[in-house]
Image (tube, helix red, strand yellow):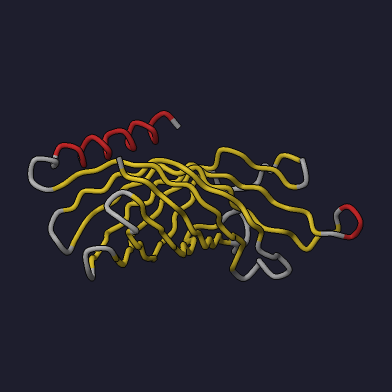
Amino acid sequence: MKKAFLIIACLFMAVGAYAQEGSLKFGVKAGANFSGYWGDDASGSKGKFGYQGGLIAEYRASSMFAIAPELIFTSQGARLGVDGINGGRKCNYLNYIALPIMGKVYTGDNFSVNFGPEFGIAVFDHIAGNKVSNYNKFNFGIAVGATYYVDKNIFVDARYTMGVTNVYKEGSVKNYNVSLGLGYFF
């Protein structure tokens, strides 16, 4: 885990090193998400609501392109097809520290289409209060989305992330996550 945080810190410093050539800004972001599982062994699972929040940087390389690494805590997981209290579904909570690295293509001054990889490290895991032991600690996904800038500091971000790696060590179950966030650049 220390290596992952070192890599994240180096990425933010590397983005900062380019500040002389373009514009660089830092900010915060928070929002809600809807996550679940997909794959051959994901039948019977349903999506669940969660939350996210963290830090964002954006290096605007030109009037049309920017790169935006983020460091986000995100609450993900799914409702499983297992009977819980009063016949309800048990929730699988898998929370991640995620590092999306989004490329942004601006179609105007206040709108961008975003795409890029997302790396995640699981930091919390429970199913109905019981610790999960057979899951992969690393998550990788591909993200696409859009950002609308209300003004030069406030933005709204919508994103879909499709997991590529399996959630569990056995079987074919992957994450998906739909998020809507509100952010502020300093």
Residue 63 lies, in percent from the top left, at 14, 61
Residue 88 located left or right of residue 131: right
Residue 61: which quarter of the image?
Answer: bottom left
Quadrant placement of the C terminus: top left
Q: Does 59 sit above or below residue 124?
A: below
Residue 134 located left or right of residue 155: right
As drawn, the residue found furthest toward the top would be 2
Residue 164 located left or right of residue 155: right
Q: Does 107 sit above or below residue 53?
A: below
User: What residue is drawn where x is 27% and y is 61%?
Assistant: 104
Q: Nearer the viewer, residue 154 or 45?
A: 154
Q: Is residue 107 visible?
A: yes
Q: Does 4 sit above or below residue 51?
A: above
Residue 71 lies, in percent from the top left, at 40, 42
User: What residue is drawn where x is 8% and y is 40%?
Assistant: 20
Residue 3: which quarter of the image?
Answer: top left
User: What residue is drawn where x is 48% and y is 44%?
Assistant: 53
Residue 46 lies, in percent from the top left, at 69, 65
User: What residue is drawn where x is 31% and y is 49%?
Assistant: 153
Q: Nearer the viewer, residue 132 or 102?
A: 102
Q: Nearer the viewer, residue 168 or 181?
A: 181
